[in-house]
Image: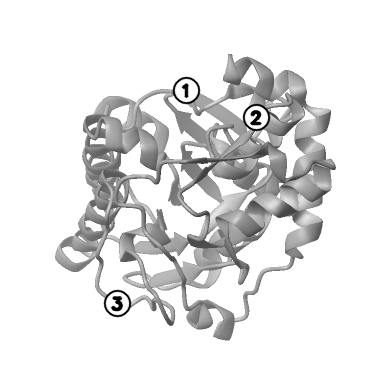
Amino acid sequence: MKLLVTGGAGFIGSNFIRMMFEKYQEIEITNLDKLTYAGNIDNLKDISNPNYNFVHGDICDPEIVMQAMEGVDFVVHFAAESHVDRSIKDSSVFVITNVVGTNNLLKCAMDSDIKKFIHVSTDEVYGSIREGSFSETDNLNPSSPYSSSKAGSDLLAMSYHNTYGLPVTITRCTNNFGPCQYPEKLIPLFITNLMDGKQVPVYGTGLNIRDWIYVEDHCSGIDFVMQHGKAGEIYNIGGGNELTNLEITHRILKVLGKNESMIRYVEDRKGHDFRYSLDCSKLKKMGWKPQYNFDTALDATVQWYVNNRWWWEPLKC
C-alpha cells in the first residue's frame, strides 16, 4: 500500500504518518508539505523508515503534485490553512490553499490510478447547532472564512466524484488535541501560557461548546474510513466529549496546579459559533469508535508539552 499524505508535517498529518508506520509493516508513505508556519519537519524527525519519503512542495503546484502522486494507491489530504482567527484577519491564503490547492490535487488524482482520495475536513462546515447533532446529510452553513473555504473544498471534492467518478471520501472531525499541535490552538496555547506563567485568554463568557477528540482517535478513524469507507460517502468522526471552553480551561488549570486567577476574559471572536456537535453513529455502526478517555489523553498531552519545551518555545517567540 502506497500513500500520498499532504500536510504530513502538520499536527494531525504527522500523528497519522507515525500511526500508519506503526500499524502497517509494508506501507510506503510520501509526505508532501509546504512547511508553512504550522508545518514542522521536527514532527517526524523520529521516522527512520526507508519507506518514508518527504517532498517539500505546495499542493497548488501541479508538477510537484503529479510527481508525488506517481504510483500512489491512496491520497490522504490534510493540507489546509486551519486557524479561524487568522482567516478572519486575512482570508486570501485560506481560499488559495483550501480551495485552489484541493482542486489541483483532485485534478492530478484524475490523471493517476488512485484507489481512494480521502479528503479530511471539519465539523465547522456545518455551522453552529444549539440542540442535537449534525449528520452527514445535513446542509452546510459555515460561519468563518476558514470554515467556508473548507466547505467549498468539500463540495469541490464531492463534485469530482459525482461528475468524473473519482473515488472521493470525505471525513469531518471535531476539535483535535494531542502532541505536536501548533501553540495557537486553544489547548496547547493554554498549556504553554500557563507553563510560562502567563494568563490564558478565554473568549466572551467561555460557554461556547466543542466536542474534543484525541488526535490518535482521529487518525484511527481516518484509517478505518480508508479501509472500509465507500467512495462518494461522508463520515463524521467525533470523540463524544462536548465541553465548554471554560470547562476545558478549568481542567488544564487543574492538571498544571494553577487557579482561576490565570484566566483572562477577552472580547469574543467575531462570528463565534456557539456549539458544534456531530452525530457519528454512521461510522460507529460500521465498527469504529474512539478509544481514549478524555482526561487521560489530556494528562498525556500536558505532559508532552512539559517534556518538549524545546519543540514549542521557539514557535511562541
- Residue 27: x and y in percent read 63, 47
Q: CA distance from mark 2 to mark 3?
A: 35 Å
Question: Is residue 298 visible from the viewing direction of this image?
Answer: yes
**Viewer-side residue, 88 vs 53:** 88
Q: Is residue 179 visible?
A: no
Residues packed near mark 2 inside 10 Å, few (<14), some (14 to 19) or many (20 plus): many
Q: Nearer the viewer, residue 95 or 230?
A: 95
User: How many numbered circles does the render carry?
Assistant: 3
Q: Secondary structure at mark 3?
A: loop
Q: Position of residue 60 (x, y in %)?
A: 27, 30
**Residue 220's quadrant in the figure?**
bottom right
Q: Which mark is residue 37?
A: 1
Q: What residue is disc 2 on?
A: 43
Query: Does 138 sit above or below residue 197?
Result: below
Task: Judge depth for marks 1 and 2 and give the one in front.
Answer: 1
Kind of residue at disc 1 = Tyr
